[in-house]
Image (cartoon, helix red, strand yellow):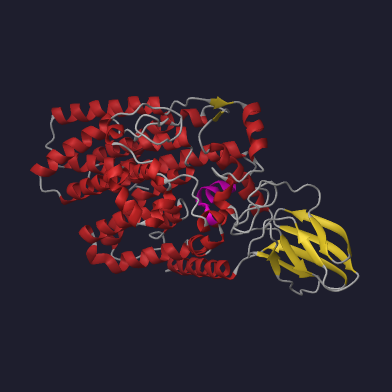
């Protein structure tokens, strides 16, 4: 506790800034209308309901696609919904769950930025953390885009760097070192892997003498996240969007032009091709532009490896946003699934405050330094206030109506993004017929339904009776009877589930289980958790 008190006044300052800039989250019952906000509300509800029914890890979203179900959480980052799950299970509605998760992640990132530098200078660390909290792209993610996964990934980036520093100081691996990168892995599919080259670059230039400890920590992070990463990669072949290379949006239409980084009107629209058509801002902001410009001059005068390293990192990131980088995007085809090159702006909340810290660290203390720092902090807070003021709020009636419309959809920009490859490409509805006899003769009775399971009794007059389940087929669907006899499931021509039952009276259970790949991934994560538990005791 004694070690904490010296940090308390500084943490109090940044907490007050965070509370002020999130006033429109916690200070009203209304819901901020954002691009993806409604999707997160529905996903949180579906996720929490699945947990209540004993599904863990959660993979199948059975109520989506109009009740046919999709393997949403097999492919879409589950991290934010695991964070929100305890609140959902305690009875908080999904709106407050998402709001509180956003506030917690926002503050977590700010605190991480502070502790990244607090040992060197508490004042400069506080300035860096405030710059983090006021970074335009971070506020864009919260108040315009509603990009919850990106918010979580960005929040834990500073903590992964704290781990590197701590490993080099302690010279031994402890149980908490793998956690930040693990949380990044389940926070966002793309950012966690795109951050990896930056991570390696920092390790190579600053911590190469501790590569064994760092590699061990990273492998444990991967092991913890295996339950998500392995199926997400190995079972991509089951998605229509992957086999058809239909990613809804093409990266070619969403490069950022240099002028847009310098100035772009703040708005709540969407990204469109061209320099004048975008509905929201990609601008770095005046403070960030000053920091980058002054950072270049400082790097020329001062021999600061850290400053030069981070200037190179942000330079490469910004270059990859521009149309000039199109040939690289064509070569590295996996990153095309990211859809929007401007997503790389996610690294600005990390890089800009770090560059600012190293600039300050290379200056002599003077009134001029304090005046300039104070002026740009004021500018940052001013724009932070503006950017944290939403365009639209939705009252209870409006959000309830929108939730009613979206609860049966797929919570993705296009239905095809998470649709199993076998499924019908036409939108369809369950109706009242969940199970029927597709071939042969049988009486079906005692039907019980949950989003992940159907149980029914059937009296078949002969063998070879085919039962058809009106759900989207996926290899994780299984069927067995009351004696434990298993019946292979298969896809119909239009992506429903068929299985051939036995003659006589039987009770069948058709349910979502785990594929072989998913079972392997679950075991890897479980064994890694046991390893962490041993490390805690040691």
Q: Position of residue 44 (x, y in %)?
A: 59, 45
Above-or-below relation of 222 to 387: below
The one nearer the camera, 120 or 161, is 161
Q: Is residue 78 magenta?
A: yes
Above-or-below relation of 410 to 28: below
- Left or right relative to 259: residue 463: right
Residue 118 in view (yes/no): no
- Which quadrant of the figure contains the C terminus? bottom left
Q: Is residue 44 magenta?
A: no
- Left or right relative to 40: residue 341: left
Q: Residue at x 80, y 74 (%)?
A: 483
Part of the protein shown in magenta: 75-86
Q: Position of residue 23 (x, y in %)?
A: 47, 28
Could you tell me how many numbered marks the image carries?
Answer: 0
Q: Position of residue 19 (x, y in %)?
A: 43, 32
Q: Residue at x 77, y 54 (%)?
A: 449
Residue 9 in view (yes/no): yes
The one nearer the camera, 458 or 1, is 458
Residue 220 figure quarter: bottom left
Q: Residue at x 40, y 30 (%)?
A: 277
């Amino acid at each position: 506790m004694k070690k904490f008190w010296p940090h308390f006044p500084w943490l109090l300052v940044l907490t007050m800034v965070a509370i002020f800039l999130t006033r429109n989250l916690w200070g009203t019952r209304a819901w901020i209308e954002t691009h993806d906000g409604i999707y997160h509300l529905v996903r949180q509800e579906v996720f929490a309901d699945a947990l209540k029914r004993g599904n863990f890890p959660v993979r199948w979203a059975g109520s989506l696609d109009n009740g046919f179900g999709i393997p949403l959480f097999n492919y879409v980052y589950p991290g934010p919904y695991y964070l929100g799950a305890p609140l959902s299970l305690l009875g908080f509605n999904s709106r407050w769950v998402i709001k509180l998760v956003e506030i917690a992640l926002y503050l977590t990132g700010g605190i991480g930025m502070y502790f990244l530098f607090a040992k060197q200078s508490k004042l400069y660390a506080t300035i860096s953390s405030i710059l983090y909290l006021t970074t335009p792209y971070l506020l864009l993610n919260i108040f315009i885009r509603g990009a919850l996964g990106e918010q979580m990934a960005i929040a834990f980036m500073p903590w992964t760097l704290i781990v590197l520093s701590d490993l080099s100081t302690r010279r031994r691996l402890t149980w908490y070192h793998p956690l930040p990168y693990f949380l990044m892995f389940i926070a966002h599919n793309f950012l966690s892997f795109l951050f990896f080259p930056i991570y390696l670059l920092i390790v190579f230039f600053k911590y190469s003498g501790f590569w064994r400890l760092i590699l061990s920590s990273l492998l444990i992070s991967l092991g913890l996240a295996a339950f998500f990463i392995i199926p997400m990669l190995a079972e991509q072949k089951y998605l229509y969007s992957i086999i058809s290379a239909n990613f809804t949006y093409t990266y070619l239409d969403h490069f950022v032009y240099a002028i847009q980084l310098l100035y772009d009107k703040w708005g709540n629209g969407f990204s469109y091709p061209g320099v004048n058509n975008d509905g929201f801002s990609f601008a770095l902001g005046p403070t960030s532009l000053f920091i980058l410009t002054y950072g270049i001059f400082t790097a020329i005068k001062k021999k600061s490896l850290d400053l030069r390293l981070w200037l190179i990192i942000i330079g490469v990131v910004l270059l990859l946003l521009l149309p000039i980088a199109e040939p690289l995007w064509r070569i590295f085809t996996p990153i095309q699934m990211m859809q929007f090159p401007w997503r790389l702006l996610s690294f600005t909340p990390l890089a800009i405050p770090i560059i600012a810290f190293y600039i300050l660290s290379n200056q002599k203390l003077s009134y001029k330094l304090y005046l300039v720092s104070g002026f740009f902090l004021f500018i940052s807070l001013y724009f932070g206030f503006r950017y944290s003021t939403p365009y639209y709020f939705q009252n209870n009636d409006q959000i309830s109506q929108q939730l009613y419309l979206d609860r049966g959809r797929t919570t993705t920009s296009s239905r095809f993004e998470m649709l199993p490859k076998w499924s019908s490409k036409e939108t369809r509805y369950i109706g009242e017929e969940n199970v029927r006899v597709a071939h042969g003769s049988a009486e079906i009775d005692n039907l019980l339904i949950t989003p992940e399971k159907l149980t029914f009794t059937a009296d078949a007059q002969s063998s070879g009776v085919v039962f058809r389940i009106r759900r989207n087929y996926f290899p994780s669907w299984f069927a067995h009877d009351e004696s434990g006899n298993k019946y292979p499931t298969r896809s119909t021509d239009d992506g429903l589930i068929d299985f051939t039952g036995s003659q006589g009276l039987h009770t069948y259970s058709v349910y979502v289980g785990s594929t072989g790949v998913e079972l392997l991934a679950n075991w890897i994560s479980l064994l890694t958790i046991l390893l962490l538990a041993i490390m805690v005791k040691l």
